[in-house]
Amino acid sequence: MNKPAFVTAFVLLTLTPLAPADEGMWLLNQPPTATLKSRYGFEPSAAWLEHMQKSAVRIGASGSFVSPNGLILTNHHVGSDQLQKLSTPQRDLIKDGFYASTPADELKCPDLEIQVLWSIQDVTEQVLASTAGKTGEAAVAARRACMSDIEGRSKKDTGLDSEVVTLYHGARYHLYRYKRYDDLRLVFAPEMQTAFFGGDNDNFEYPRFCLDVCMFRAYENGKPLRVEHYLKWSKGAADGDLAIVFGHPGSTNRLYSMAHLEFWRDVEMPFSLNRLWRREVQLQTFMARNDENYRIGVEDFFGVQNGRKARTGTLAGLLDPKLMKSKADDEAALRKFVDADPKRKAEWGGAWDRLATAEAGWRTHFLSNELLNGRGLSGGSELFGLARSFVRLADELEKPNGERLREYRETELDSLRLSLISDAPIHDALEIDRLAGGLSLAAENLGGGDPLVTRILAGQSPHERAVGLVQGCTLKDASLRRQLFDGGSAAIRAHHDPMIDFFRAIDADARALRKRHEDEVESVERDCYAQIAAARFARDGESVYPDATGTLRMAFGPIRGYSEDGKAVPAFTTFAGLYQRNQERHGAPPFQLLPRWEAARSKLHLDTPYNFVCTADIIGGNSGSPIVNKAGELIGLIFDGNIQSLSAGIAYSDEQSRAVAVDSRAIIEALRVVYGASALADELEGKQDAK
Amino acid sequence: MNKPAFVTAFVLLTLTPLAPADEGMWLLNQPPTATLKSRYGFEPSAAWLEHMQKSAVRIGASGSFVSPNGLILTNHHVGSDQLQKLSTPQRDLIKDGFYASTPADELKCPDLEIQVLWSIQDVTEQVLASTAGKTGEAAVAARRACMSDIEGRSKKDTGLDSEVVTLYHGARYHLYRYKRYDDLRLVFAPEMQTAFFGGDNDNFEYPRFCLDVCMFRAYENGKPLRVEHYLKWSKGAADGDLAIVFGHPGSTNRLYSMAHLEFWRDVEMPFSLNRLWRREVQLQTFMARNDENYRIGVEDFFGVQNGRKARTGTLAGLLDPKLMKSKADDEAALRKFVDADPKRKAEWGGAWDRLATAEAGWRTHFLSNELLNGRGLSGGSELFGLARSFVRLADELEKPNGERLREYRETELDSLRLSLISDAPIHDALEIDRLAGGLSLAAENLGGGDPLVTRILAGQSPHERAVGLVQGCTLKDASLRRQLFDGGSAAIRAHHDPMIDFFRAIDADARALRKRHEDEVESVERDCYAQIAAARFARDGESVYPDATGTLRMAFGPIRGYSEDGKAVPAFTTFAGLYQRNQERHGAPPFQLLPRWEAARSKLHLDTPYNFVCTADIIGGNSGSPIVNKAGELIGLIFDGNIQSLSAGIAYSDEQSRAVAVDSRAIIEALRVVYGASALADELEGKQDAK
């Protein structure tokens, strides 16, 4: 690792010819077997793949079972939402971390649930048949009814959570069935400062020195869940070893048409970046006011910083003429292939222009839709979100399942209830800050004299209005929410408070905008991308992986450093590097070391690998993904991508773009030496029998 | 000061009936004598006013002579631009402050100049006559020629800097003549942490604990300037005392029509806030990278934070329905008065609708103009600014004086030369960050496929393009700039580098946008506001003060606390409060105390008044304004307004809105006890003879 000259030479010699071949977020039912065999001499068996599939856990983002007793490994920044909700002014788990040395000490999470993918079934024919000859509104309704029907029947037949997943933006539909668990308990989390050493400064950078780790345990019937499929701990991996990642990449846009990418570049990214820059500054001001504001705001803050940095990278990619040219060339080549044959041209040739028309139309109502249906107006207020959920629940419950908005269909109601009756704390001060910001955002973007703005402000300033809505909101009471949910439409309809009535007054506008987007944009996208994908399949065969959809995927690539500004960046860092980075930044925030890490310095094996990078193709949502070796043993835990990976949503590259992981050895060493958590380390290493 | 119950009672009893009467930023040639006499029993003589006028100094913002030897008192945040320019990696004056105990130690500023107002002459008739019967382009040209002609002749006749000031947005024109000095030397500055204790957190807040003080000395012919008019130091003031402020408020919008205010609310404020939020986050990222980036970026950073906080307050005012209703009522009443009389209606009745049409038109090209002529595209890059100045200088010098852009007229060339040949350091890293941000801003706002964007990016990403332009720019060399300036049009035309050629390629667009704004918006505004002001004068007499114009004004009001959320905020703070604030915020940034302040604690008179508030009507640009008592002695130094004052651009209130000042006694005590600067304190207190 300390041979930069060697590493550089290695990189120069091997990277270019191999570049594209590690690309892909592959479906578990269409694994890249040929590539794995030819490039890495690895032929995963069906049993190996099934074991991986059932060891992987969907937990907001990604995670995995790592012991037979339902122990789940994920990232600190995946678990931090629960850490925040479990914290009080007296017990700040974000700041101080947590370790339950016995099951009795584990803390039950207020509203966390996990899913384990149990089976996949292709239902493309059914879904496509449902919309045959239909367009726009009619197609949307028919497709929604068909998907809800498939899901409802599957749930009834199997008892499993059932979800029809749209692949290739509409070319394929697969039914995913999951086992779901909703009794999760917190086992271990380090301090935020340890998990996120270097803060925003080092976020999406490399080298890194982060213990971005959090562990929960799944329970069933009050006891730790016994699982057959879980990942065994490895002895660690070396430079050049193959790393195989199983996780839930959230969304990519690699198959987008140019018109769609340009919409993203010119409309979506600038709007969301403006919102995030604004919110980052507002949250800093809020948090600086006092210690309690800092505590309740910090989770939002890091989320905003993270989103801002990620989108900054995406926008840079969209403004990179070379990247956009390669996209344009690719599109032109495919269109040329299509146009070369009259039959192909008749069938698929119009897709790109129809997409362009749809995206042009979308530009005219995107802003209003973001404000009313996105995070715009609400500013992320939880009370606003609860009001929306209840108001709509009352309406949707009275419709047949197939006609409901997707998030209210029968198969979603259990999860929805869990989230709506959560007793996680809601803080008036933060809620007011969020909502006042959202109301002002609407006024800034639509204009202070806009009729909608005048209506929502009701003669008050954004701040005054937010104070009234938040202070008067009854939904802070979790037991009331339980009553409302269980009372159904009638109970909800009969209930009034300022926030609920506020949302009721704008819901017609919000629904109309959503419907317009679904009918005029989404539906056209599904249709056109199905045609474009068909053209691609016709030319290239089905060797194309679909864009990420927040569902389980497999990615792979060697552990490998890279070259930056002519300097070699080695693949691994060590604990020694952590202490060095602290020193070279004078220990100033966000590079300070906590006392327990200062104290542990002399006892730690400082050459323990801490973080490492590999070329596997990941994106946001992969956070918490396990990395395994060919033997299926856990060698690391994905927690980030480097700065060069931030345009990965649009295109993959392995020249400099890297996935960043915590090394499995660092987790054990830190648990044993820094946190005195030997029992937990033993459980991970399989040195302990079932409790 | 420690009797909140008493203070509250006092506030409640006295504030409301007196509220509007302290409003006003009065012209020195139209002082509010009647009000001062009736409310404060004070009748300033002509000699008193002349003494104040000639003691006041225009120094970017405001300042004053405070000794017969040309010593100038202003704010640290006014002087900090020069502190930054005088700093190097080895000598960080921002961080460490500065004190020259002898004239030989004083540091010559690279590009600072001051002006002292010497006389005022009403030239309204001439200017209005020049545009009689003309509109749009013709009116703009005629007015420009007339103003330049007046200025040119005045300069020739008197040797003084001469500037025609537009008052009431076009109803009156006054010729201001100034003495100018351009040899300024730094005498004293505390550390940024002392000047700006509490940072952005406490900026625009009260109570405050800031030594926001900086002192320069004017030189003439290599010797300290002997001045007849300077402010004597007072023994300090008490709660309730009248405070009289002389300074240069930058701009207010109190006379704006509703259509103009709505343009501000819906277009100007949202755009500039988006730009500032964005830049604040980008600068934080830049500064966090390493210590040197922090040093070179911090001045920009505080400027951005300050602008963001100020505009946030302004926007809140514009979104305050009560404030906007009072504005609308005021406008409606004036229109009713005008419409009630056929002659008035014929003469002035169309002004508001014409203004509304002009503002509506302005909405369509505001964005492009901001990008090309504002700070948008340049991102504040100094090299971009230099390139623009030189490219335009070459063109403008070849035109008759009366046809030139205002900043290139003969009377401006001395100041322009000083700024263009400054040897203040220019940092590539910061320049690239600024320009890359500006180029991306243009792409985000106009769209990546916009022809102008495509042209300016020239096939590169914003960052790549910025690197090329900055690294290739020859204007970093001050001696080259001197050659170019002195070589005139021919020399400039013959010179090429990437940045200069870059600006040349967009100047036609930029000029066209500027011309369109001048012809279609500014000219209409002047015309319409002249009519509206005439209507107001007809109804109310000439007791109306004009909106602020960055020229010398007089404001006044008592030293007085206020009530906030039911709690009394006393008028004065003390040094004791500084130590207390440090303690209650755990000494964490931005509340840390420097070692010299820790060490001085036991020696300081802790009950020394540190900061105080008064009701005088101020706005940005008043920074550094002296506050005097009726005897004309200096009692304080304006450095801020409180958060309630941030909508003062639109409307004055003295209910909670306050000007914030450093107490004269704190300056002396800090100089003597903390900084060992007794010689300077003696000079201020007149205890020392001329050096």
Image (tube, coloured by chain):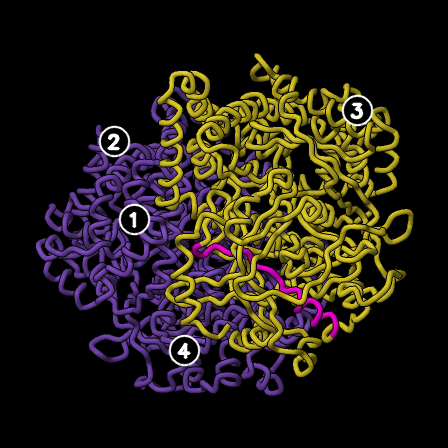
Chain colours: A yellow, B purple
Dot placed on the residue nearer the N-terminal end, 1 or 4 = 1
Q: Are marks 2 and 3 in contact (CB under 8 Å)?
A: no
Q: What's under tag 4, amino acid-wise?
A: Phe
Q: Are marks 1 and 4 in contact (CB under 8 Å)?
A: no
- Let me know if residue A440 appears in the view: no
Q: Nearer the viewer, mark 2 or mark 3?
A: 3
Q: Tell me the CA gap for discs 1 and 2.
A: 20 Å
Q: Nearer the viewer, mark 1 or mark 4?
A: 4
User: Is residue A418 shown in magenta?
Assistant: no
Q: Tell me the CA gap for discs 4 and 3.
A: 72 Å
Is residue A441 positioned above or below A351 on the image?
below
Q: Residues within 10 Å of mark 3 (few under 14, many from 20)?
A: some
Left or right of A233, for residue B298: left
- Report the front residue among B512 and A43: A43
Which residue is disc 1 drawn over? B165
Determine which of the numbered discs, if any, sits on residue B136 in the image: 2
Q: Tell me the CA gap for discs 4 and 2.
A: 49 Å
Q: What's under tag 2, amino acid-wise?
A: Gly
Q: Residue drawn 23% across and 64% down?
A: B418
Q: Which residues are magenta?
A: A655-672
